[in-house]
Amino acid sequence: MRRYGKHTDEDDIRSRPNRKGNRPRTNIRPKHEDAAEGLVLTVDRGRLTCLVDGRPIIAMKARELGRKAAVVGDRVALVGDLSGKKDTLARIVRIEERTSVLRRTADDDDPYERVVVANADQLAIVTALADPEPRPRLIDRCLVAAYDGGLEPLLVMTKSDLAPPDKLLELYGDLDIPYVVTSRAELDDGAAADRVREHIDGKVTAFVGHSGVGKTTLVNALVPEDRRRVTGHVNAVTGRGRHTTTSALALPLAGGDGWVVDTPGVRSFGLAHIDPSRVIHAFPDLEPGTEGCPRACSHDEPDCALDAWVAEGHADPARLYSLRRLLATRERKEGD
């Protein structure tokens, strides 16, 4: 048996060649300290449009990020060709920590959650008062997703010339949600956009709504220099609209300092990913009353301490009703 001392002749040692002819793998990854900061504006089949120093850059996700995906609203770090010229491609090497995340699933039985937008300050829930009829259960689901993801809700009611908003306002009045009521004529003359702009200036606002409610029309009024196609119509039989937005897109607010994120129209908003115990955080007047609740309390059972908390006058009974209505949303379909 051949033995080697401390000073071996490297030429005598046999080593297995690297078949691929490239450098050996290493766990050390570059830090990319000189990477540029960017904002993801839209995602299309693996290509991301990012805003870097005021110019759009086409980029792709670096392999080192693994399965982690960037979405609209993400703050990212980019390297490579940042000129923005035609046929150039940069790489996203880092996704910064998110301040908020709006998620949804296809339905309540789907375990795969989809991130709609990141780092938004608020969620504008757009609903028509008629044509199509309002869907309170869908609104409730959007509210739960907003509260769970750290977004403030804003209720935008359109087509007030076809129906009054009183019934819907009564339903959500106890939640203290800011709201805006608009008509079709106000969308045309710019009055609706002006009122909505007061609530979204200086913020990142994601707009979500059922197809046909006028969401994209409103976005077009808020961002006139980047108008999007508004060719959808409402089916007279199903009451559903045709999708006019096919991918989420972040747009700078005209005449302001905010961002508008237009999202595709939704026909369902699954909440399979939502932990009901987190919904209570959206009710700061009720949350202290849960200290006496049994472990894993659903807040809608005989031993729930919130009943006594409200009975003692610490909170309005209507607020407890609203909480329980939202918690029960996961057990109902949107069309119920």
Image (cartoon, rainbow, N blue to C red):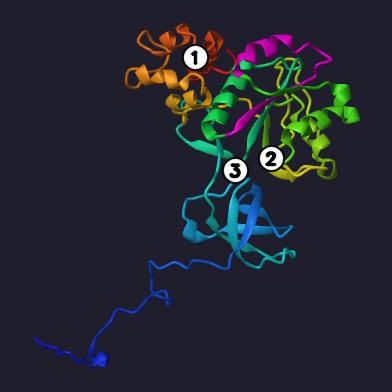
Residue 6 in picture, x, y percent from top left: 17, 89
- Kindly identify which residue carries mark 1: 324
In what quadrant of the picture does the N terminus appear?
bottom left
Residue at x-position 40% and y-position 18%: 298
Estimate the spatial distance between the alpha carbons at disc 2 and disc 1, rounded to whole Å.
30 Å
Q: Closer to the camera, 322 or 161?
A: 322
**SS of the residue under disc 1:** helix
Residue placed farthest to the left in the image?
Answer: 1
Q: Is residue 55 visible?
A: yes
- Is residue 196 rendered to the left or right of residue 65? right
Observer-side mark, 2 or 3, equals 2
Task: Identify whether 147 is placed above or below 117.
Answer: above
The quarter holding residue 307 reads top left
**SS of the residue under disc 2:** loop
Task: Identify whether 29 is placed above or below 200.
Answer: below
The dot on residue 203 is 2
Task: Identify whether 260 is placed above or below 277.
Answer: below
Residue 79 in picture, x, y percent from top left: 60, 65
Is residue 272 one of those drawn in magenta? no
- Earlier sequence position, callout 2 versus callout 1: 2
